[in-house]
Amino acid sequence: MAVKRSEDYAHLQAAFDALNNGDELLIAPGEYFGGGAETTKIPLSADGRGIYVLTPKTNITVTPLGEVIIAPCCVTDGIFLLGCSNWTFGRGLTIRDAYGDGYFVDGRKVNYFFHTPRAHTGGFHLCECSDISVDTPIIYDNEVGFHPEDGDHITLLDANIYNNGQAGIRNKDCAFLTIQNCRTFNNGLYTNRVHQNPALTERASMQGLCFYGGDDLLVDGLISYGNQEDAILNYCGNMPRTATRVTIRNCQLQANKKGEHPLVVSYINMADSTWEISNNGLWNETEPAGGYLRIDPPSDPHTPWTPPAGYSNPLSFAQMALYLERLNPLSVGNYLLKELPSEIIPVPPRSRFARFEQAIMGRRPAPGIYDDNGNFLMKGEATPFSFTGSVQPLDPQEMITVPEGRDFSEARKIYTTYKLQVADRATGVNADTVILPEGEFEVRSVAPYQGRILAHYKVVVVR
């Protein structure tokens, strides 16, 4: 494994090109602009496009060392991975102003989505990838926000995805997709910005979350509101089938701008799939006219589903509850939201993960001695202190530093400009204690990274 630093390369694309299997890339904080931007203070790539990884690479960790903004500002994807596996993207990443257009191979444009000339992608685009984890990104003002297709085991955590021209999240036939504690709002609104891709039309998906096929999908804790179309849509369209084995739970879903359905399972009879829809809060200002669930048959997407006796289409809230429970006994506990919770407001365009801004408390022990049993005897009181840093999980290679007998989940790494101290038996210095939300951690190692843009330390701590 090698640790590579973005500041050691002419542009960010070159740093991604240099990655070998098992490497970690540390991205210095800053705004990385593409060819359509007014300034190229920190260039994104040599040709002004977004980040493209077209040669499959595995076991890669991408760690922003603070707020990293990727802004191509042209017709391109923000980040595109093809055939990659076991990638982890840490906190602090923002992708904006990527207007979508497939990807390029040897100067030739290849549109991947549906293999048609209308490759509306943009944002964060994963093709035929597996075991990809993206933690706490902010994705806005792109064509599509987050777009996995034809892959498996993709995890999106704590994302804020908003103001994208089409769907906030669009899944195309990706299996084992997990969307955990994310927010999608104000997507599908073409008036949000002037897009530079002349091929764009309003005929495409404009939901908070859209499924085009896929199996074993988990949506947990999604907050979706203010989108041009539905909060969640299961769509067959020109796909051979719709999504199956889907769990939607603990979500808060608002009807779209038109006052229509907060949750739509479209072009499928739900009896043909295994869906669990439970413990979700739903809000529709236009009920009963708008309803809460619409079901259309796959045979003819233009012919509404004929509901059983006593049901309408779309279903009212009461009808939806009865219908879902009849199909799946686990589909219970859904409830009405009388209004959107006050804390559901758009986040500002800039990430809250500015460079090392997370406040962390610590304690520095007084000097002491070690007794014959190896116990540290402190002479004096510990001194409290505070610093700022970016806390990240360990990647697989770094886990070998965890002491034997300790669980890997009990270790973290912290990037900070503050120099912490480790234990030194020869001088009687004991290690600093770092206080995180999970508990108290002891500093095990401190490695300096004196880069040209931001000098800092990587600190490994163990509970």
Image: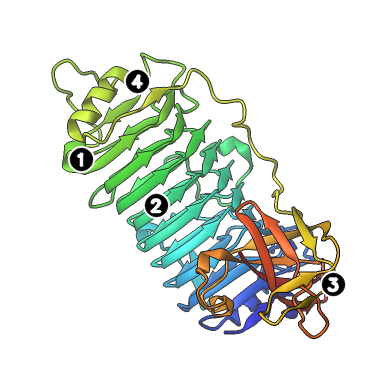
Give the CA distance from mark 4 to mark 1: 20 Å
Q: Where is the C terminus found, in terms of image quarters? A: bottom right
Query: Is 285 rendered above or below residue 251?
Result: above
Query: Is 220 rendered above or below residue 410?
Result: above
Q: Secondary structure at mark 3?
A: loop
Of tags 1 and 3, the one toward the viewer is: 3
- Of labels 3 and 2, earlier in sequence is 2
Give the CA distance from mark 4 to mark 2: 25 Å
Q: Is residue 5 left or right of residue 146?
A: right
Q: Quadrant of residue 286?
A: top left
- Of labels 1 and 3, earlier in sequence is 1
Q: Is residue 88 left or right of residue 192?
A: left
Residue to which mark 2 is pinned: 171
Residue at (47% x, 79% y) in the render: 55
Residue to which mark 4 is pinned: 291
Of tags 3 and 2, the one toward the viewer is: 3
Of tags 2 and 1, the one toward the viewer is: 2
Amino acid residing under circle 3: Pro
- Of labels 4 and 1, earlier in sequence is 4
Mark 2 residue crowding within 10 angstroms, few (<14) / some (14–19) / many (20+): many
Residue to which mark 1 is pinned: 298
Give the CA distance from mark 2 to mark 1: 18 Å
Q: Who is closer to the viewer here, 395 or 53?
A: 395
Mark 1 residue crowding within 10 angstroms, few (<14) / some (14–19) / many (20+): many
Location of residue 23 in the rendering, given as x and y in whole percent from the top left corner: 57, 80
Location of residue 183 in the rendering, given as x and y in whole percent from the top left corner: 53, 41
Give the CA distance from mark 3 to mark 2: 56 Å
Residue at (62% x, 55% y) in the render: 439
Residue to which mark 3 is pinned: 367
Give the CA distance from mark 1 to mark 3: 73 Å
